[in-house]
Image: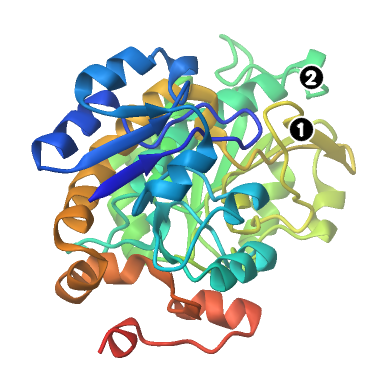
Amino acid sequence: MLIGIPKEIKNNEYRVGMTPAGVRELVAHGHNVVIEAGAGDAIGLSDEMYRQAGADIYSTASEVYATAELIVKVKEPQAQERTMLRPNQLLFTYLHLAPDYQQTKDLVESGAMCIAYETVTDSDGGLPLLAPMSEVAGRMAVQAGAHALENTQGGLGILLGGVPGVSPADVVILGGGVVGINAARMAMGLGADVTIIDKSIARLKTLDEQFGPQLKTLYSTTEMVERAVVRADMVIGAVLVPGATAPKLVTTAMLHKMKRGAVLIDVAIDQGGCFESSHATTHDEPTYVEEGVIHYCVANMPGGVARTSTFALTNATLPFVIELATKGINTAIVENEHLRAGLNIYQGEVTYQAVAYAHGYTFKNALELMV
């Protein structure tokens, strides 16, 4: 199969869909790879490195889209990229369609087949292609929040770990999944006072056993979330409903009661955000202030540490890319239920229930479409 890797064009997005090592592996399996010139330059992956791995270098994205059977990306295709997709072409990338009607509409009308990294599953019920970026985002959230808490950034002027005789910051994390665990580990490592709130008692028990008394755990209710948020110096939104719009756990009414100069980090912003006051920001302008509270809502957080993120993502996606390229999409989807869970759009039909529900499309079973 001919696999194409275009350069990412989202604001300050420097990740690339495949490392040279990944390209070499695909070539070893008998596939051809084309990559847009300069796709990896920002993270030290030169065209020559890709060429030595066996890829052909194309000068423009339009050439990549026009020739490749399988497009491997990182972020959702931007408007100009969506016009280059064609019927029966396979797109494999993060999509986050539930809060994005226009992208959904464009992809449906393209006739392409679209598999979303964030809804591919594994045998343990996890999300293996979302996990590596969730790990990065969870760790970055603390880093970004600590910076935003500085007075020069408009924050309260609090050092996360405090100093002897001075209390550390109060960090509240909504959600005990991959993002939440990684955020907690970083925040506790810096000496903060950390609380995770989750609606799963089993998850809270696991966290308690894993981290001990250093980490506080609370069961999620509206009242408990409000109490924790009001006292917090930093709140990290790490809530996930796979493929669906994130629930709004922190309301504007709660925002009014928070400390002026406190910080909200919305890691769920790709799925619409879990704070009622959230709207997507970029690495160019990562924060804004509402009701005196700083909001950090960058929609591609891992793009800020793009080299680390690219290597972590390729490690996770490569086996699936090889399977898709070797078997073809129909055989791969029929034989692999985990890839099937990732299929959001197939030749003009919406095949992921949460996306269909979010935008008023009729949900279609992927297996029935392939008969």
The amino acid type, in three-letter code, at marker 1 is Thr
Q: Going 38% across and 24% down the picture, which residue do you hit?
A: 308
Q: Give the labeled residue for mark 2.
A: 153
Which element carries disc 2, helix, strand or loop?
helix
Q: Nearer the viewer, residue 146 or 342?
A: 342
Outermost residue on the right side: it is 291
Q: Nearer the viewer, residue 108 or 227?
A: 108
Q: Going 78% across and 24% down the picture, which residue do you hit?
A: 155
Q: Is residue 193 visible?
A: no
Asked if disc 1 and disc 2 are in contact, CB closer than 8 Å, the reply is yes
Residue 301 found in image quarter: top right
Q: Nearer the viewer, residue 229 or 79?
A: 79
Q: Give the labeled residue for mark 1.
A: 287
Q: Is residue 343 visible?
A: yes
Q: Going 81% across and 51% down the picture, which residue do you hit?
A: 255
Q: Residues within 10 Å of mark 2 (few under 14, many from 20)?
A: few
